[in-house]
Amino acid sequence: MPFCVKCGAEGPTYRSLCARCFLEGKSFTSLPDHVDLFQCAHCKDYLLDGKWVGEESRERAAERAVRSAAIISRDAEVRRMDLRAEMIDEANCQVKMAVELDVEGLPVHEYRSTIVRFKSSSCPRCNRLMGSYYEGTLQVRTRDRRMPEGLREEIVDRICQLVEEHRKGDRELFISKIDRLTSTHGGVDVLLSSSTLGRAISRNLADQYAAEVKESATLVTQKQGQDLYRVTFLVRLPAYRFGDIVRYERRLFLVGALRANSTKLTDLRTSQAAMVSNSDMTAAKVVGRREDLLEAVVVSETEREVQVMHPVTFKVFELRKPPRFERKGDTVKVFQGDEEFYLLPLQG
Ligand SMILES: [Zn+2]
Ligand SMILES: [Zn+2]
C-alpha cells in the first residue's frame, strides 16, 4: 500500500504525497490585481486580445478581458471557468471567477476576483475617421444633364449599402465624407478609406447604370517608405435610364437593360432589339422619360391596331401595333413624340 511521505497516510499518492498534503497551500490560478480595458470613445469597441471588437455590454467585455488575463498553472487543466461581472461605478467593474480544475486527476475548485478598469481610448479606425482620412474618391456625375435628386439619393444609398457589405469582411473600411454637390451639374462625391473599395464600388455602379469609369491616381505622400496614393474614380452615368425613350441613329428606341459595356435598345417601330455599346450610346439623345410615358385606356383592338383614349385630352385615336405587340392589361403605354404617338413594343 502506498503512503504519504509527509503525513504517513495510506492510500493513493500524488508525487509521493496524499491528496491533502499534495494540494495544501497550493493554488493553480491567479488574476492580476486589476485589468485595464480600453474602449474606443467613438465607436465603443473594446481592445480585447489585441483586436478592436464590439461587445454586447460592458460586463461581457470585462468578463472576456478577465478570461484573457487569468493565469493558470501548467500543472492544472481547466474543466470549467465561470465569470460574473458587476459594475461598481461608471469606470470600474468587479469580475468574480470560479474555476474547476483537474490536477493530476484530482478535482480542484478555485475562486478569484479582480477589478476591471475601463479606459477611454480611440481605435485606429476612428483616429483616421476623425482626421477625415481617405484614399479613394468616387465622383458620380451624369453626362449631359444635371443629376436628378432622386437618382442621387438612390446612388448614395447603394454606395452606403455596398460599404456595409464590404465591412463584413474588413471593419477598417468606412466612408469619410459624402458631399452632395449644389453646382449646376449636381452629382455627389464620396470619400472612402480605401481605393480598392472605391474600385469595387465604381465597377458595381458601372454595371448597374451603364456608367463609364475613369480612374486617376495622385501621389499624396510617402508614409514609412511607402507611397500613399489617392485614387479618384470618375463615374459618369449616361443621360438615359432604363425605360426611357432615346433617339439614336435617327430612330426611336426604348432603353432596356443597362450593362457595364452595352445597353439594350428596342426599336419602337420594328420591335427589334439590339445591344449597343455604351461608347456608341453617347450619341443617343433622351427624348422621353420613363415617367412621361402615357398610360392610355384601350377602347378597342383589331389585328393591326388598337384604339386608345388619351388620358389627358380624352381624345380617342388609333395606333398601329408594332410587330409582336402583346397587350397585358386594359391600358397600354404610349410615347408621345413631337409629331406622333408610338405604342411601346414592350408592355408591362
Ligand atoms: Zn499526507
Ligand atoms: Zn473606434
Image (cartoon, rainbow, N blue to C red):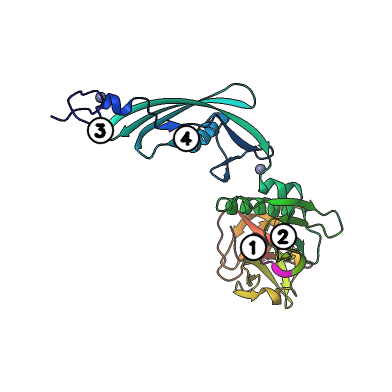
Alpha-carbon distance for marks 2 and 1?
9 Å
Secondary structure under tag 4 reads loop
Quarter of the picture holding the C terminus: bottom right
Q: Which residue is mark 2?
A: 135
What span is in magenta?
Answer: 196-216
Three-letter amino acid code at disc 3? Tyr
Which residue is farthest left? 1
Mark 1 or mark 3, earlier in chain: 3
Quarter of the picture holding the N terminus: top left
Q: Which residue is mark 1?
A: 196
Q: Is residue 139 above or below residue 77?
A: below
Alpha-carbon neighbours of circle 3 within 10 Å: few (<14), some, or many (≥20)? Answer: some
Which residue is farthest right? 184
Ligand 2 within 8 angstroms of badge 2 C-beta: no
From the viewer's side, name the closer residue of 205 and 137: 137
Three-letter amino acid code at disc 4? Ala
